[in-house]
Image (cartoon, helix red, strand yellow):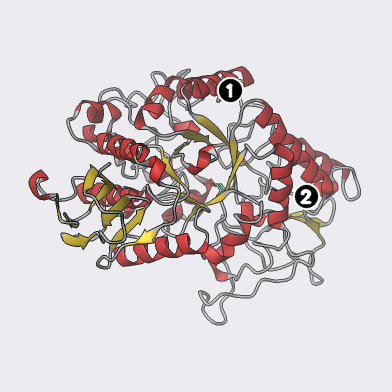
């Protein structure tokens, strides 16, 4: 079995995790100092967001040099120290690779701009003539707003950018681009990376003719498309040649390097070709992220995903791109209970769960005042801004920055957190989301040997996720009412069920879970892991 098949990952948004040098920005020195904390949660791998030299127009997802560390995060030596310490603690390291686009400050793009059409680096990017009557070559839009094309008058051409104008798309039809990325992957694998998270993995190629995208049903008849959702993305996303690129990568870096993609395509059927046939190992499952709290629908989507590609998913509740799960799930103790119950459901599925930093604390969105917004998305479309999930980790109860930085103000200013959201408080409390998450991951580890078999669904009311795998059962009551679930004894080998883990749910501790003759009573918003007595 490969390590990622039994691992739990932890996403670190480097800028906001821990500041080691007092400049207000998280960095490798800070992260390395907190690896003991990460290991103590019980996770097995750390995914660290982009740290490469970058103008930070999209906070590092605009890379100017793929083989170095931005001075704000440290140096290559600091990177090596981080990897060394992670490995010493038994943690795998997953880096974030950004292949769809570079920064406009990347030397290739600067050389293309300087040299113009036909010059050496021109073809590394996507250039088109204006439309016959002038204007952009087609109706494509940027995910961050505005057209997907920027005009360069000097050369009379447009270049394409799925994101900001400062993030020109690479031309993946060019063999040179393909060679370049294989080399970049080898560079970091040789420095100790155990895997890569592939940014917008489904978007590397475009249709070679660059036709207009059809208008979507979201658009009012007669209106002009202004928003990414106003188009059907037939020609700019999910083109047939993309999975082959990842097959090439797998051949180049060998079977031990894990590849997990951000394949943001909605339907599991569309994602399948990216995570089968020797392409990526997994994609994150985003099917839950756009949802508010809808227990029956959550259950259906999880089931569907597992049916379509059983082991193809990185299970997530959020990331540095989404509003925090606890907030989306209603906030307060209720939001925390819902999130933990859902984690209990996710922790026994085939695939790899990934926590986003702070989810183990049940963190809600950080509060960023309108005048302090920095995210390029938030500046363009305030309701979709990503700053609230990117505010610094609250380590200590006291201190201006909750121990994130002991020097300057943090790069992203936000309101103070309540005491109970800090690591310090939760470590000291008898019962806290952090302690529940540790117990959940310990129970998962203890029952891990039973997780090779297929998932067998157990009968349960709507809104309850219930399944068994090789003598381990996961039951999660996502609803706001207590429920009873019969665990079918005849399907499992005879013998008593033993409670390996229970979230305390929304009820007083005494009545949260009762177990008798295979019938389990679950409090509202609670989950359990059961295993067969040996
Ligand atoms: C991905 C990243 C996001 C970034 C975008 C452009 O969606 O997760 O943070 O802005 O790609 O690289």
The one of 187 and 488 positioned closer to us in this rendering: 488
Q: Does residue 43 lie above or below 404 as drawn?
A: below
Residue in the picture at 70% in, 37% down: 253
Q: Which residue is mark 1?
A: 79
* Front tag of 1 and 2: 1
Q: Does residue 449 lie above or below 130 as drawn?
A: above
Question: Which numbered dot is residue 286?
Answer: none
Q: Which residue is mark 2?
A: 125
Q: Position of residue 69 (x, y in %)?
A: 62, 26
Residue in the picture at 29% in, 22% down: 399
The one of 50 and 227 positioned closer to us in this rendering: 50
Report the side of 258 relative to 115 (left or right).
Answer: left
The answer to whether residue 105 shows anywhere in this view is no
Tell me which label, 1 or 2, sits earlier in the chain: 1
Residue furthest toward the front?
494
The answer to whether residue 224 shows anywhere in this view is yes
Helix, strand or loop status at disc 2: loop
Q: Position of residue 37 (x, y in %)?
A: 37, 25
> Image quarter for residue 525?
bottom left
Report the side of 382 relative to 343 (left or right).
Answer: right
Q: Position of residue 143 (x, y in %)?
A: 58, 57
Residue in the picture at 72% in, 54% down: 244
Report the side of 362 relative to 240 (left or right).
Answer: left
């Amino acid at each position: 079995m490969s390590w990622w098949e039994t691992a739990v990952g932890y996403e670190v948004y480097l800028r906001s995790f821990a500041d080691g040098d007092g400049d207000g920005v998280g960095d490798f020195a800070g992260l390395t100092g907190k690896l003991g904390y990460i290991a103590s949660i019980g996770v097995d791998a750390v995914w660290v967001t982009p740290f490469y030299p970058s103008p930070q127009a999209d906070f590092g997802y605009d890379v100017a040099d793929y083989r170095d560390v931005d001075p704000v995060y440290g140096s290559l030596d600091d990177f090596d120290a981080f990897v060394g310490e992670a490995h010493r603690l038994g943690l795998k390291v997953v880096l974030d690779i950004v292949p769809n686009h570079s920064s406009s400050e990347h030397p290739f793009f600067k050389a293309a701009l300087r040299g113009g059409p036909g010059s050496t680096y021109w073809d590394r990017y996507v250039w088109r003539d204006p439309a016959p009557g002038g204007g952009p070559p087609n109706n494509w839009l940027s995910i961050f707003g505005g057209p997907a094309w920027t005009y360069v008058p000097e050369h009379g051409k447009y270049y394409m950018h799925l994101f900001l104008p400062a993030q020109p798309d690479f031309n993946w039809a060019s063999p040179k681009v393909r060679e370049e990325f294989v080399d970049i992957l080898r560079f970091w694998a040789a420095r100790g990376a155990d895997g890569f998270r592939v940014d917008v993995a489904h978007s590397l190629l475009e249709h070679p003719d660059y036709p207009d995208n059809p208008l979507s049903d979201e658009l009012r008849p007669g209106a002009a498309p202004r928003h990414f959702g106003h188009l059907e993305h037939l020609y700019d996303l999910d083109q047939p040649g993309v999975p082959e690129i990842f097959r090439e990568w797998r051949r180049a870096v060998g079977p031990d390097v894990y590849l997990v993609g951000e394949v943001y395509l909605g339907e599991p059927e569309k994602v399948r070709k990216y995570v089968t046939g020797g392409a990526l190992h997994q994609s994150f499952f985003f099917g839950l992220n756009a949802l508010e709290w809808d227990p029956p629908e959550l259950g259906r989507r999880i089931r569907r995903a597992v049916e379509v590609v059983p082991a193809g998913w990185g299970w997530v509740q959020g990331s540095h791109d989404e509003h925090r799960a606890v907030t989306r799930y209603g906030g307060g103790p209720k939001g925390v209970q819902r999130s933990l119950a859902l984690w209990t459901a996710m922790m026994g599925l085939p695939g790899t769960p990934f926590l986003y930093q702070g989810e183990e604390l049940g963190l809600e969105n950080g509060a960023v005042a309108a005048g302090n917004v920095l995210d390029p998305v938030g500046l363009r479309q305030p309701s979709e801004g990503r700053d609230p999930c990117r505010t610094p980790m609250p380590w200590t109860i006291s201190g201006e920055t909750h121990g994130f930085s002991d020097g300057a103000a943090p790069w992203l200013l936000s309101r103070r957190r309540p005491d109970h959201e800090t690591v310090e408080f939760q470590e000291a409390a008898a019962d806290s989301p952090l302690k529940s998450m540790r117990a959940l991951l310990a129970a998962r580890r203890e029952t891990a040997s039973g997780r090779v078999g297929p998932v067998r669904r157990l009968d349960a009311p709507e809104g309850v996720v219930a399944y068994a795998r090789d003598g381990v059962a996961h039951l999660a009551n996502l609803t706001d009412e207590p429920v009873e679930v019969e665990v079918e004894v005849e399907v499992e080998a005879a013998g008593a069920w033993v409670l390996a883990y229970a979230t305390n749910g929304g009820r007083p501790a005494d009545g949260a879970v009762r177990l008798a003759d295979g019938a389990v009573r679950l409090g509202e918003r609670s989950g359990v892991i059961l295993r067969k007595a040996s």
